[in-house]
Image (cartoon, rainbow, N blue to C red):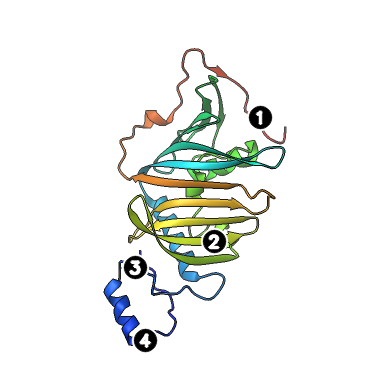
Amino acid sequence: MMFHFRSKPMTLKTKLLCLALLPVSLACWSADESAINPRVVSALEQMGDHLRSLPKFQVDAQFSLDVVNESGQKIKTLGTSQLTADGRSRLKVRLDSDRQTREFFYDGKKFTQYSPRLKFYTTVNAPDNVQDMLHAVEAHYALQVPMEDLFQFGTDSPLIKALTAATYVGPSTVNGKVCDHLAFRRPGVDWQVWLTRAEKPLPCKLVVTRTDKPAQPEYAAVYRWNLNPKVTPAGFTFQAHAGDAEIPFKKIAE
């Protein structure tokens, strides 16, 4: 994907320089002067629609997460996560961090959260598609599945409808690839996303900052994508191991 923003008046020499550099650099183009740049919003929507259209994919992330302690100090934790999706009804996620290890399984019928270290798991019935499942477990159990942000973008996303600012920052190199750096704002949250330069873009990096909290904690992740992973339906159904114990998954209203 290439961005072509409305440019400020340029000399002939500058125009020729820009033509010589394209598509290597977008530095010669200035962002739309409005708070919400429609080209930037469109780029985000296209990325989200592309992700939703993929028949299957696997994405690995290296992330950092700020945890705010009782004194208000931010403590940064590091970790990795891997998400595998097969169509719209199967999802598997593993999270390994300084604080915990968790695995999540969804086979289109049931959702399971598993703690390998503590050897406990919880299983509940779930809606028949990933989007509704993610919404249900967060609404009923206050649980956010790692990297669920990737499913929240698209042309009909409430997240996009709530935007108060959308700007193009410029080109940036992530994992050795030139990506386009976009910045967004909505009430209580600033977030930034870096997109690959392609007809069907993928996110290279994501940074989310909570501006509604005094400490303004931040989450940052860098992604590596595999669009043709080897998957089997059985891999998305949780199988308990010897010594594992099932515990209730209580709803937040109870």
Q: Amino acid at mark 2?
A: Phe
Mark 3 to mark 1 CA distance (whole Å):
52 Å
Query: Picture quarter containing residue 71?
Result: top right
Q: Dots 2 and 3: beta carbons under 8 Å? A: no
Of the two numbered discs 4 and 1 in the rendering, the one whose residue sits closer to the viewer: 4
Residue behind mark 2: 184
For marks 4 and 1, the one nearer the N-term is 4
Q: Residue at x 67, y 33 (%)?
A: 251
Mark 1 to mark 2 CA distance (whole Å):
35 Å
Viewer-nearest residue: 146 or 240: 146
Q: Residues within 10 Å of mark 4 (few under 14, many from 20)?
A: few
Viewer-nearest residue: 133 or 2: 2
Disc 2 is placed on an element classified as: strand
> What label sits on residue 129 in the rendered view?
none
Disc 1 is placed on an element classified as: loop
Residue behind mark 4: 11
Residue behind mark 3: 25
Q: Residues within 10 Å of mark 3 (few under 14, many from 20)?
A: some
